[in-house]
Image (cartoon, rainbow, N blue to C red):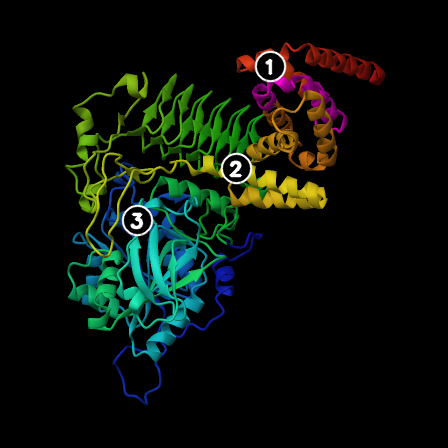
């Protein structure tokens, strides 16, 4: 992925530094005499700020998707920063839904300054219903003079398109404008967390020219069928690719807008690509692709992608688009980059005993109470967080009030929300704008709470500019709030999604967190373009669970190789760290998984029937060998607790090895991986499981604990 570097003064200049190629635009096709000098034209872009779907409902009932904050920066600002760094000098933003809010955002931003290298034009119309409508309007207005870049307003990318742009221009010059589009893809294995299920594609390409021969959506396909002419063509070598992530970035010739005008059945880019490929022999047009391997380009198409991209920004995979650079130049956006990827804004107050573990962004003016634990989360501007709050993979927007004892896991809390004390949000919950929940409430997984009644969805037109500007939930006065659902002081309604939808594929059910499939629906299309058998989606909605298992296997392989090749601890730590970032594993999970892998190693070597004595001897040897690896991750009190939790979990699953537990703890203590205070603290805690309680009653462990207590008393007496 992209470079993971430090900070700098100008993000756009950093990205532009990667774009070494010249920015000379091609002349208008068919214009001018043969001997006339080429006219230098500015590079232009079309940015579509509408999604033309309801995937982010009910959030986008109050805010257009392009303005949703991603690590405290509006999505459209990432798209504009990418275009500006690419060398785009003129961008046309087309929008319909809540167009006024987008106009106001642009007017207040750095993009409206006279010094901006990218001139922005915002164009709105209530008639836009699809990408096809936008491009037909582009053609009617004749605003494009040369090749242009086409993207959406929810693209986050640091891809260097200079090479692709030059290749596109060279092809058009060489083949007399035959190539009308170059699509940008990134190499990405199937199932990768930034690869959206609904955007999975199969592509057939000419290996020599990168010409696209066949293109089809591949989500949940059981079979793939390809037209025979692909294999009977004059092409010497073709590639069938299923390892590509669609960046939704396209380099287009002006003919693209004309072709949309000529073909009113073209509504999406996929329609256009299919039409061009089917009629290639008749029209003579071609589509090419450019594949990058080391850069970043993702469309935020649902909340699962939102979570993945936000995490990657914090972990610096989208460098130089990092939180501390404040590339939108927002006066609220200043922050400092601290250890473990913690970004802290100005005027932030952190209460006594609160822990900000890793991968956290805290916006300006936020107040955090005492004894809070925050990890892998984003907190917006001017939030107030009470005492004893736990935030894990929580995405908190602006002006949010969170009461004492709240626990939020893998959920989104929109702006101006109030969470009363002792509320728990299980994963995939969403609290839309202005709602109140609690107190003393647990929201089940996947709960969505909104100020809008669910039955309003059919009554309002998402694409009507009037429908989204200053509307209020008038029907809310008719129906009261269900206190059993939102709490005794709650304000809002549980949002449910209709099972029927307008998608092309009837078996697809929209979901704010991603694509779900009806298990009952299996259909087989007779179309040669996309003939397939569909089956229910068997992939997990939460790919991080799979990533943790893969990470564990990778760490096991790394340590086994370390034994065989006598690799130093420093090199092992480097390898484990690279795996941590590759699979997006938290520091807590790294500590626990690495501990458990080391504990399992003797069983891998001797088998599960090994005696406690043999296991103990082998484990002691491994602990001595890899003590420095463990020490790298076990530094703070919470790290000690995570390590001991992993030890307890492992031995809870292997009762026959309990006699070896004392030797393991003694070795970790003697190697100074663990200290007596944390061991005693762990033992004194009430065990969450029956196995844990039985372990604490083990005679050998109790003798060891008594010895530690006596050693601590003697140490205190010597100090006195």
How many C-alpha atoms fall within 10 Å of the one at disc 1: few (<14), some, or many (≥20)?
few
Disc 2, SS:
loop
| Location of residue 633 (image quadrant) | top right
Q: In this view of the protein, which residue sits in the foreground, 35 or 380?
A: 35
Say whether residue 178 is visible: yes
Label pair 3/1, CB-CB below 8 angstroms = no
Q: In this view of the protein, which residue sits in the foreground, 519 or 416?
A: 519
Disc 1, SS:
loop
Label pair 1/2, CB-CB below 8 angstroms = no
Q: Is residue 653 magenta?
A: yes
The residue that disc 1 covers is 685
Checking the image for residue 347, the label placed there is 2
Mark sitting earlier along the chain (1/2): 2
Q: Nearer the viewer, mark 1 or mark 2?
A: 1
Question: Percent x, y for residue 68?
Answer: 35, 43
Q: With respect to residue 543, does 232 lie above or below?
A: below
Disc 3, SS:
loop
Q: Main secondary structure of the magenta part?
A: helix
Magenta part of the chain: 648-677
Question: Percent x, y for residue 9?
Answer: 54, 56
What residue is drawn where x is 31% and y is 50%?
A: 218
Q: Is residue 663 magenta?
A: yes
Q: In the image as oriented, which residue stretches furthest toward the bottom?
A: 35
Question: Percent x, y for residue 659?
Answer: 68, 17
Q: Nearer the viewer, mark 3 or mark 1?
A: 3
Question: Percent x, y for residue 47?
Answer: 31, 58
Mark sitting earlier along the chain (3/1): 3
The residue that disc 3 covers is 223
How many C-alpha atoms fall within 10 Å of the one at disc 2: few (<14), some, or many (≥20)?
few
């Amino acid at each position: 992925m992209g470079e993971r570097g430090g900070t700098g003064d100008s993000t756009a200049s950093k990205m532009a530094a990667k774009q070494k190629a010249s920015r000379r635009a091609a002349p208008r096709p068919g214009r001018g005499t043969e001997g006339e000098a080429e006219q230098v034209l500015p590079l232009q872009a079309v940015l579509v700020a509408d999604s033309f779907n309801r995937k982010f409902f009910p959030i986008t009932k109050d805010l257009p998707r392009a303005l949703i904050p991603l690590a405290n920066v509006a999505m459209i600002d990432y798209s504009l920063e990418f275009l500006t760094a690419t060398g785009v000098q003129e961008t046309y933003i087309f929008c319909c839904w809540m167009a006024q809010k987008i106009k106001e955002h642009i007017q207040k931003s750095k993009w409206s300054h006279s010094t901006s290298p990218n001139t922005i034009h915002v164009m709105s119309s209530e008639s836009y219903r699809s990408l096809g409508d936008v491009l037909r309007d582009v053609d009617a207005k004749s605003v494009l003079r040369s090749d242009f870049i086409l993207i959406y307003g929810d693209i986050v990318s640091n891809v260097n398109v200079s090479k692709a742009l030059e290749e596109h221009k060279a092809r058009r010059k060489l083949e007399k404008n035959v190539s009308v589009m170059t699509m940008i893809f990134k190499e990405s294995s199937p199932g990768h967390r930034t690869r959206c299920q609904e955007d999975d594609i199969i592509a057939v390409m000419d290996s020599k020219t990168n010409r696209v021969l066949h293109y089809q959506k591949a989500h949940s396909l059981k079979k793939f069928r390809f037209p025979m002419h692909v294999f009977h063509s004059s092409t010497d070598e073709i590639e069938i690719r299923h390892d590509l992530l669609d960046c939704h970035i396209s380099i287009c010739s002006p003919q693209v807008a004309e072709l949309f005008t000529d073909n009113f059945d073209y509504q999406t880019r996929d329609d256009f690509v299919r039409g061009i490929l089917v009629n290639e022999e008749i029209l003579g047009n071609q589509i090419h692709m450019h594949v990058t391997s080391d850069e970043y380009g993702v469309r935020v198409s649902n909340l699962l992608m939102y979570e993945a991209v936000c995490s990657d920004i914090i972990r610096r995979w989208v460098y130089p688009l990092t939180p501390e650079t404040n590339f939108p130049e927002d006066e609220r956006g200043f922050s400092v980059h601290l250890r473990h990827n913690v970004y802290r804004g100005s005027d932030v107050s952190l209460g006594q005993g609160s822990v900000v573990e890793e991968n956290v962004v805290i916006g300006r003016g936020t107040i955090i109470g005492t004894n809070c634990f925050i990890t892998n989360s984003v907190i917006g501007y001017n939030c107030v967080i009470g005492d004893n709050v736990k935030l894990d993979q929580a995405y908190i927007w602006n002006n949010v009030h969170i009461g004492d004892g709240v626990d939020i896991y893998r959920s989104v809390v929109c702006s101006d929300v109030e969470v009363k004390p002792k509320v728990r949000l299980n994963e995939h919950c969403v609290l839309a704008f202005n709602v109140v929940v609690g107190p003393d409430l647990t929201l089940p997984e996947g709960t969505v709470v909104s100020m809008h009644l669910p039955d309003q969805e059919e009554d309002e037109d998402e694409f009507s500019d009037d429908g989204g500007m200053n509307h209020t939930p008038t029907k809310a006065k008719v129906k009261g709030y269900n206190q059993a659902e939102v709490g005794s002081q709650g304000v809002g309604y549980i949002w449910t999604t209709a099972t029927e939808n307008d998608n092309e594929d009837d078996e697809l059910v929209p979901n704010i967190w991603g694509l779900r499939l009806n298990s009952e629906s299996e259909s087989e299309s007779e179309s040669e373009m996309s003939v397939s058998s569909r089956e229910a989606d068997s992939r997990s909605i939460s790919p991080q669970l799979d990533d943790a298992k893969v990470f564990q296997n990778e760490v096991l392989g790394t340590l086994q190789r370390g034994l065989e090749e006598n690799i130093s601890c420093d090199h092992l730590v480097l390898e484990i760290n690279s795996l941590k970032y590759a699979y997006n594993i938290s520091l807590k999970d790294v500590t626990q998984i690495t501990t458990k892998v080391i504990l399992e190693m003797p069983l891998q070597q001797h088998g599960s029937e090994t005696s406690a004595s043999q296991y103990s001897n082998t484990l002691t040897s491994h602990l001595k060998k890899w003590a420095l690896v463990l020490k790298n991750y076990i530094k703070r009190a919470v790290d000690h607790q995570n390590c001991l939790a992993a030890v307890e979990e492992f031995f809870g699953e292997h009762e026959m090895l309990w006699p070896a537990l004392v030797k393991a703890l003694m070795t970790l203590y003697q190697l100074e991986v663990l200290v007596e205070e944390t061991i005693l603290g762990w033992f004194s805690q009430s065990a969450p499981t029956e196995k844990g309680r039985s372990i604490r009653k083990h005679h050998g462990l109790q003798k060891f604990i008594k010895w530690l207590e006596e050693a601590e008393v003697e140490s205190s007496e010597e100090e006195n």
